[in-house]
Image (cartoon, rainbow, N blue to C red):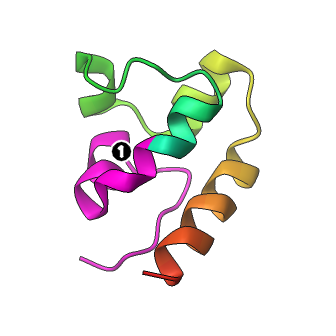
Amino acid sequence: MENKVTKDTIIIDVLRMNPETAQFFLEIGMHCLGCPSASGESIEQACAVHGVDADALVNKINDFLAKQ
């Protein structure tokens, strides 16, 4: 699996790529990482619910993953 995410990437898949990415979700108030929604919700869907810019979060996660 390539270590790059898009707005369509499911949250649990991001966490499987690197569990340390949880910090970025927690920073913006997504504290439901263990709930069933994380298994089926895309980054874009979660950002819409939490009022967060999905593009900014994707960029932040991809910058982090690129350094790993």
Mark 1 crowdedness (10 Å alpha carbons): few <14, some 14-19, many ≥20: many
Front in this rendered view, residue 63 or 8: 63
Question: How many marks on residues?
Answer: 1
Q: Which residue is rendered at x = 53% and y = 60% of the image?
A: 6
Q: Which residues are magenta?
A: 1-22
Q: Is 68 on the left or on the right of 51, as rendered?
A: left
- Look at 75% across and 52% down and name the residue there: 56
Q: Position of residue 37 (x, y in %)?
A: 32, 20
Q: Give the camera-side residue of 61 and 42.
A: 61
- Is residue 25 depicted above or below 13 in this figure? above
The three-letter amino acid code for the residue at tag 1 is: Ile
Verify whether residue 14 appears in magenta: yes
Left or right: where 51 falls relative to 12: right
Question: Is residue 51 rendered magenta in the image?
Answer: no
Quadrant, the C terminus: bottom left
Q: Measured from the top left, where is residue 42 in percent x and y? A: 44, 39
Horizontally, residue 4 falls left or right of residue 1, namely right
Badge 1 is on which residue?
10
**Up-down relation of residue 22 to residue 19 (above or below):** above
**Residue located 22% across and 55% down the image:** 16
Residue 47 place in picture, x, y as percent: 62, 30
Q: Quadrant of the N terminus?
A: bottom left
Q: Label 1's element?
A: loop
- Against 37, residue 12 (above or below) is below
In x, y percent, where is residue 15? 31, 49
